[in-house]
Image (tube, rainbow, N blue to C red):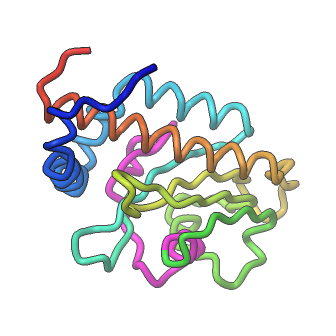
Amino acid sequence: MITSDPIVSEYASHIERSLARAAGELGPEEFKGVIGDPGLSVLRTAMDYINADFISIWFANQDQKKLVVTHSEPDPSFIGWEQSISEGLISLAYASEQSLCENQVYLNAQHSKRIDEALNQVTCAMIVTPFYMCGTLRGVISTVQIKDSEDAPDPPGFSASNLNRMRRLSTVLERLVNYRLLTRLLDLEL
């Protein structure tokens, strides 16, 4: 049975503060390095498993006024895209800290169409789930299914089980990030 080490436990609060500070300072390039190949593999697998066209991780910026794409599969050119914290369904999920799953998103008046217009596509289905690092809300993970025009048939959409998978993905990524940051802070090579 593994028990806490009293010597390490003595520094637990300091380690937690350092971990939270490090997590708060992660930007897009640092985040990609922290999740590494294991995190990228998990993201791609989840995207394929639920039949999503895109998966993106959005971080709230420092002043909490915008969500910024920090990671995007399969199109990394989407990294850096910003959206006001008060606009769209991703912001609703962030503000409420509640996951959402919606098909026929294009019919929802709260859906921001700016991305669709910029990329000349129609978002049909969306899952958005909060993303935490070190127990603190940092952003959201979004997955979408798209179509090329309004006249095209909708893709199959997402299910409640897909939503649950995305919630678990968020938890797995948080734990991976926490672990990777902790090993760096403690200069451990595991």
Residue 32: x %, y % from top left = 31, 37
Quadrant in which residue 65 is drawn? bottom left
Classify the position of the C terminus by image quarter: top left
Let me know if residue 26 appears in the view.
no
Residue found at x 23% / y 35% = 182
Let me know if residue 111 is in the magenta part.
no
Instruction: Please give left or right for residue 137 compared with residue 128 in the image.
Output: left
Residue 19: x %, y % from top left = 21, 47
Establish if 183 lies above or below 148.
Answer: above
Residue found at x 75% / y 60% = 124
Residue 135: x %, y % from top left = 39, 56
9, 159: nearer the viewer: 9
Residue found at x 63% / y 76% = 111
2, 46: nearer the viewer: 2
136, 99: nearer the viewer: 136
Quadrant in which residue 5 is drawn? top left
Quadrant in which residue 116 is drawn? bottom right
Let me know if residue 108 appears in the view.
yes
Residue found at x 68% / y 62% = 122
Residue 106: x %, y % from top left = 73, 71
Establish if 38 lies above or below 54.
Answer: above
Instruction: Please give left or right for residue 46 compared with residue 147 in the image.
Output: left
Region of the chain picked out in magenta, as a range = 70-94
Establish if 19 lies above or below 187.
Answer: below
